[in-house]
C-alpha cells in the first residue's frame, strides 16, 4: 500500500526512524519488499535521478506497482531522492510519488530557500510533501560530489529560518555523515549535540539523515577476497547510533551504499566460486534473499521492525 510520507512520519516521530532505501532494478525491489514484510516494517522506497535514467521512469513505476500487488501487507511511500527542480516537477506531475526531495544545498541560503519554496508550492497543490537539505554532506554518490573541505554541518538557527521561509515538510541535515563508502576515520561519528540543538529549535519537525550506510568491515573484506579492490579502512555510520538519533527527531534514514555492497559481494563470490556459470539469475536469486535479510537487520536497528500494525492502525 502506497501512503504519504507525512503519514509515516506522524507515527514514527520520536519513536523510530523509517528506513529509506534506493532501488534500481527488479532484484533490489523484490528484496526490499520481502525484507520489510519479513520484519513487519514500514519503509520509504527511494528513486534517484540516476535510477530514473538507468532503468527508465515507466519501468521503475511498473516494477513498484507489481511489487505492491505481490506484497499486499507492505506499507510504504515513494520518494524522489536528490532531485533538481525540473525532476521534482516531473515527479510531482506524474501523480505517482508520495514526496520529493529538492536538493539545492549547494546554492546560497537565499537561493536554496527560493528554489525550495517554488517546489513546495507546486507539490503542496497536489498533496505531495517536500524534503529539502541544509548544510552539505561530503563524499560521492551517483552525481553528488562534495569534498570534505566544503562539507559543513547544518546551522540550527539557519534551520529554523529555512523551514519557516521555504515551507518544506522535512529537512535533511548535515550532522557528520557523508555519501558513499568512505565516511569516517578513527572514532569520528554522528554529531549528536548538533542534532539536539536543531530539535530544540524545531520541536516535532521531522529530520532526515542522509549518507547513513554503515559500510560493514565484513562486507568490504569479503568483496576484496573475491577480487574487489576496496580500501579496507572504509567506514560508515555506527548503526547502533540510529536509535538515539530517532529519539531526537531523525525520522527518515537514507541507506543506499550498504545495499550496493551486498550486491557486489554476492555476485563476486558467486562467480569466483562458480567460474563456469554465466546465468545471472542464479546470483540474482541469492542476492534477493541476502538483500531482504539486510533490510530486516537495518529495520531492527532503526526500531521500525514490528511497527507495521501500528502504522496500519493509524491509517484507519
Image (tube, helix red, strand yellow):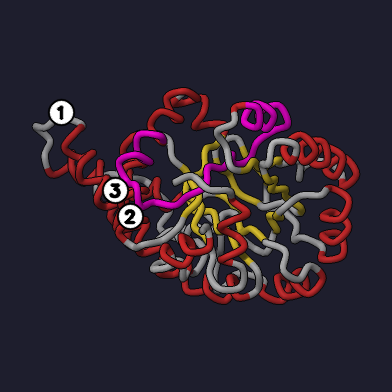
Residue at the spot 12% in from the left edge and 35% down from the top edge: 275
- What span is in magenta? 65-93
Residue 311: numbered disc:
none
Label 3 to label 1: alpha-carbon separation: 17 Å
Residue 35: numbered disc:
2
Look at the image and say whether residue 92 sits in the magenta stretch.
yes
The answer to whether residue 171 is left or right of residue 262 is right
Circle 3 crowding by C-alpha within 10 Å: few under 14, some 14–19, many from 20: many
Using the rendered view, name the quadrant where residue 279 is placed: top left
Front one among 75 and 225: 75
Front one among 276 and 134: 134
* x and y, in percent, of residue 137 in the image: 67, 52
The answer to whether residue 22 is left or right of residue 117 is left
Q: Earlier in the sequence, mark 2 or mark 1?
A: 2
Using the rendered view, name the quadrant where residue 130 is placed: top right
Residue at the spot 88% in from the left edge and 50% down from the top edge: 165
Q: Residue furthest front?
A: 316
* x and y, in percent, of residue 11 in the image: 57, 65
Residue with the mark numbered 1? 278
Residue at the spot 38% in from the left edge and 32% down from the top edge: 63
Amino acid at each position: 500500500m502506497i501512503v504519504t510520507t507525512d503519514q509515516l512520519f506522524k507515527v514514527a516521530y520520536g519513536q523510530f526512524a523509517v528506513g529509506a532505501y534506493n532501488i534500481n532494478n527488479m532484484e533490489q525491489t523484490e528484496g526490499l519488499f520481502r525484507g520489510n514484510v519479513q520484519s513487519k516494517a514500514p519503509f520509504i522506497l527511494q528513486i534517484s535521478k540516476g535510477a530514473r535514467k538507468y532503468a527508465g521512469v515507466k519501468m521503475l513505476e511498473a516494477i513498484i506497482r507489481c511489487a505492491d500487488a505481490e506484497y499486499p501487507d507492505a506499507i510504504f511511500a515513494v520518494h524522489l531522492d536528490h532531485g533538481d527542480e525540473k525532476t521534482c516537477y516531473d515527479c510531482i506531475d506524474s501523480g505517482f510519488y508520495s514526496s520529493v526531495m529538492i536538493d539545492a544545498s549547494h546554492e546560497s541560503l537565499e537561493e536554496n530557500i527560493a528554489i525550495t519554496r517554488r517546489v513546495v508550492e507546486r507539490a503542496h497543490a497536489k498533496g505531495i510533501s517536500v524534503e529539502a537539505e541544509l548544510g552539505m554532506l561530503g563524499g560521492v554518490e551517483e552525481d553528488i560530489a562534495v569534498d570534505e573541505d566544503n562539507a559543513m554541518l547544518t546551522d540550527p538557527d539557519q534551520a529554523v529560518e529555512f523551514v519557516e521561509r521555504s515551507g518544506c515538510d522535512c529537512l535533511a541535515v548535515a550532522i557528520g555523515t557523508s555519501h558513499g563508502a568512505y565516511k569516517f576515520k578513527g572514532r569520528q561519528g554522528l554529531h549528536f549535540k548538533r542534532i539536539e540543538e536543531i530539535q530544540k529549535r524545531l520541536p516535532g519537525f521531522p529530520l532526515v539523515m542522509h549518507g547513513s550506510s554503515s559500510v560493514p568491515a565484513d562486507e568490504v573484506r569479503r568483496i576484496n577476497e573475491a577480487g574487489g579492490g576496496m580500501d579496507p579502512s572504509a567506514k560508515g555510520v555506527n548503526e547502533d547510533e540510529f536509535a538515539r538519533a530517532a529519539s531526537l527527531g531523525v525520522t527518515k534514514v537514507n541507506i543506499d551504499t550498504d545495499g550496493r555492497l551486498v550486491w557486489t559481494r554476492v555476485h563476486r563470490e558467486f562467480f569466483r566460486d562458480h567460474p563456469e556459470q554465466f546465468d545471472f539469475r542464479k546470483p540474482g536469486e541469492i542476492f534477493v534473499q541476502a538483500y531482504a535479510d539486510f533490510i530486516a537487520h537495518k529495520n531492527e536497528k532503526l526500531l521500525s521492525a514490528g511497527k507495521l500494525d501500528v502504522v496500519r492502525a493509524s491509517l484507519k
